[in-house]
Image (cartoon, grey):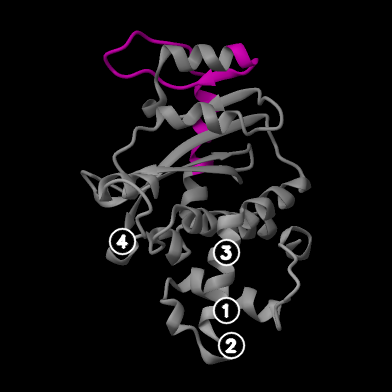
Amino acid sequence: MIEACRPHHKTQHHDLRRTIEAIIWRCQNGAKWRSLPSEFGPWWIAAQTFIGWGRLGVWERLLTMVQERGVQLGMTFLDGSNIRAHQKAAGAAQKWGSRTRCTAGEALGRSRGGYGTKAWVIADGSGRAVAFSLAPGQAHELPQAVGLLDRLLRMPRWVVADRGYTSHAFRQHIWNMGSGPVIPPQRHEAPVACPAWIYHNRNRVERLWARLKEWRAVATRYEKKASSFMGVLCLTATFDWLKD
């Protein structure tokens, strides 16, 4: 699959398998690129490959390719997770504007939980990641939901989410798509239809985040660029698909 979706240049990798193994080792352990064991070859080759492919969207294409096994869309789950950023994640090169705008452009921001990133996932009925979205740590869940739903190849029967996605407009948007919303109301709101036997399955997306955060590069963000951190998420989600 990597051979099918990677860029092909005139100068090819000397040992691509070893480079991919180095990238996987680093994402599993959250170490510095310079700390790669010597058997993985020069550290800078793995670092440049991972960062460059992230900028070109290779890791996202890899996740899309593995989904050809079949996405189960009887139910679709939306959920976000706060991911703390390491101090080394700050300081990306500023090409325009102020530092605040630059960090926001790289999906970094401050919330009550500290400095970090908010990552959203849309998962299929089996609890496997279909697509991700990133925003600064203080961002709300709801603005990202419509964009994630638009990335599905076909409409699911049910869209399941927690109270953070409560909105009459969002529920109506789901109905207009031909799907049924399963989103409980806030405690101060009037009751709405939310079948308990469907909402009970929302733990599948929570278990997905638990599996992804077993990779230390997901549990803590070390990447300065949003494209690189998106690459980490897509790579780990690809392995989650292959494991089933």
Residue position marked by numbered label 1 in the rendering: 45
From this viewpoint, which residue is outermost toward the top? 190
Q: What is the C-alpha distance between the residues marked 3 and 1?
A: 10 Å
Going from the N terminus, do you reach mark 3 or mark 1 first? 1
- Whether 190 is among the magenta residues is yes
In x, y percent, where is residue 112? 20, 44
Q: Residue at x 31, y 12 (%)?
A: 189
Name the kind of residue labelled 1 in the image. Answer: Ile
- Residue contact between numbered discs 1 and 2, judged by CB atoms under 8 Å: yes
Residue position marked by numbered label 3 in the rendering: 52
In x, y percent, where is residue 49? 59, 70
Question: In the figure, is residue 98 to the left or right of 154?
Answer: left
Residue position marked by numbered label 4 in the rendering: 91
Q: What is the C-alpha distance between the residues marked 4 and 3?
A: 18 Å
Name the kind of residue labelled 4 in the image. Answer: Gly
In x, y percent, where is residue 109? 29, 46
From this viewpoint, which residue is outermost toward the bottom? 38
